[in-house]
Every structure is written in structure tokens, then in C-alpha cells.
């Protein structure tokens, strides 16, 4: 029997014989993946976990919101730094610090700097 012609029940039975278990995780509210520079936030994602040979593999299906996190602002944001400096009258160091504290959120950084 060819795998392309199997129904889902037959495929599940075959995978079980090979020691592969696949399960959906129900009612997922949020999935967050964090790296040193970015944060991927999935709201209402579909998550499937596959266990084979003692290892678990997770599959996430959804559209993430990607945010810059921590560290120095990226080169593409140099114009943003200049803009915030013009808007607030603050130094580059103060603007960079505010951007770091707000995870790169320009509006929040401006508010933070103007409320001091």
C-alpha cells in the first residue's frame, strides 16, 4: 500500500507500529519563542507534538508577531534613533537606553523619555 493512498487511521496505525506518537495539543492560548535578539509570539496557534525514539518534536502553525528584544537597536533603526532624539531632545545614549527598555517600541520610548 502506498503512503499517498492511506487514510488517516491507517497512517496512525503504521506510525504507532514504528513507535511514533503524534498528538494535537488542545486549547493553546499562546506560544512564545525567544532568541537573544527576537521574540516570536503566536496567539491561538495550532500545536502538534510528535514523539519518536524518546525525542519530542513540536510543530507550530500560525502567524507570529515578531519583536526585537534586548540588546542594541539594529542598524535599520538608526533613523528611528535620530527621530526620537529630535522629538525628545534627549541624547543618543538616553534614546538607546529607552529603546532597550521598551524592546524597540518607538512610541513607548518617546513617552518614556518625555515623561522624565
Image (cartoon, rainbow, N blue to C red):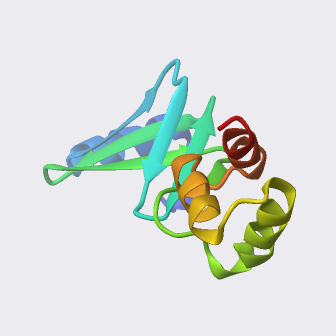
Name the residue located 39 percent from the left edge and 47 percent from the top edge: 58
Between 108 and 91, the residue placed more toward the observer is: 91
Q: Residue furthest left?
A: 54
Tell me if 85 is positioned left or right of 42 in this view. right
Quadrant including the C terminus:
top right
Q: Position of residue 52 (x, y in %)?
A: 22, 51
Residue 68 seen:
no
In the rendered view, would you say 89 is above or below 23? Answer: below
Q: Position of residue 111 (x, y in %)?
A: 74, 39
Between 70 and 115, the residue placed more toward the observer is: 115
Between 40 and 106, the residue placed more toward the observer is: 106
Residue 38 seen:
yes
Tell me if 49 is positioned left or right of 89 in this view. left
Name the residue located 47 percent from the left edge and 58 percent from the top edge: 70
Name the residue located 77 percent from the left edge and 64 percent from the top edge: 85
Tell me if 77 is positioned left or right of 22 in this view. right
In the rendered view, would you say 83 is above or below 46? Answer: below
> For residue 86, what is the image quadrant?
bottom right
Q: Position of residue 93 (x, y in %)?
A: 57, 67
> For residue 36, what is the image quadrant?
bottom left
In the rendered view, would you say 67 is above or below 111? Answer: below
Q: How many marks?
A: 0
Name the residue located 50 percent from the left edge and 37 percent from the top edge: 31
Q: Residue furthest top?
A: 27
Between 56 and 22, the residue placed more toward the observer is: 56
Amino acid at each position: 500500500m502506498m503512503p499517498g493512498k492511506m487514510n488517516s487511521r491507517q497512517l496512525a496505525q503504521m506510525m504507532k507500529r514504528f513507535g511514533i506518537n503524534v498528538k494535537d495539543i488542545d486549547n493553546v492560548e499562546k506560544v512564545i519563542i525567544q532568541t537573544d535578539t527576537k521574540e516570536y509570539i503566536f496567539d491561538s496557534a495550532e500545536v502538534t507534538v510528535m514523539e519518536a525514539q524518546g525525542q519530542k518534536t513540536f510543530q507550530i502553525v500560525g502567524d507570529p508577531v515578531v519583536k526585537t528584544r534586548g540588546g542594541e537597536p539594529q542598524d535599520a533603526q538608526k533613523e528611528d534613533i535620530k527621530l526620537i532624539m529630535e522629538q525628545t531632545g534627549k541624547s543618543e545614549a538616553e534614546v538607546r537606553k529607552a529603546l532597550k527598555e521598551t524592546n524597540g517600541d518607538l512610541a513607548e520610548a518617546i513617552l518614556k523619555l518625555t515623561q522624565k
